[in-house]
Amino acid sequence: MNRQDEDRDPVDVDPHDPGDGSLPVFRWKQAGRDLATRRQLRDMGLRPGGQEPVARIECRGGRRFAWLYRIDLAKPKTPMTLAKEAALDKAMAARQTCPGPCGRRYFHCLPLQTLGSCAECFDGTPADPASYLTAPTEHRPAA
């Protein structure tokens, strides 16, 4: 490392933005109908399919942005297989099941990193019976 490199100030670099201004930037609701965000593609049953973003859309004064992809190059989403569904259910069960004495599986993720259990096991706050499965049974995937 030479002296010139040491004198330079550090620069924040976005690894996804080429920095040469080649990607157009649109304001909220100004992008064309042929462009969509990942979430919009997902709602259409599509995925980017390996294509690079072609533009950015910004909102909240540039504090938030999303990448835009061409809809005509998007590919269909891969369908959920039984193996994928079983793996997803197993992962969600780990986040929704109380490791405490009640052992209930809730319909929402529990604060296991902060509390370590459900609120009822942690401090006695009663849980709404509509928020968990009534009988701790083995959960099976829907398909």
Image (spheres, grey):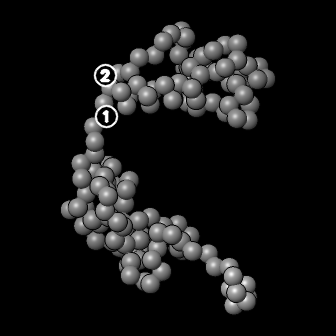
Q: Give the x, y percent position of residue 109.
A: 58, 32
Residue found 79% across the figure and 23% down from its top: 123
Of all residues, the one furthest to the bottom in this rendering is: 4
The image shows residue 40, relative to residue 103, as above or below, that is: below
Q: Which residue is mark 2?
A: 143
Estimate how packed mark 2 is, as few (under 14), some (14 to 19) or many (20 or more) residues with alpha carbons within 10 Å.
Answer: few
Callout 2–callout 1 Cβ contact below 8 Å? yes
Disc 2 to disc 1, C-alpha distance: 10 Å
Percent across and percent down for residue 53 are 36, 67
Vertical placement of residue 61 versus 109, above or below: below
Say which quarter of the image contains residue 41. bottom left
Q: Is residue 13 left or right of residue 139?
A: right
User: Which amino acid type is marked by label 2?
Assistant: Ala
**Front residue of this view, candidates 50 and 7:** 7
- Hey, which quadrant is residue 73 in on the image? bottom left
Which quarter of the figure has residue 114?
top right
Direction from residue 77 to residue 101 in the image, left or right: right
Q: Which mark is residue 80?
A: 1
Q: Nearer the viewer, residue 27 or 86?
A: 86
Q: Residue at x 43, y 83 (%)?
A: 21
Against 53, residue 20 (above or below) is below
Q: Position of residue 18 (x, y in %)?
A: 45, 77
Residue 100 percent coordinates (x, y): 70, 17
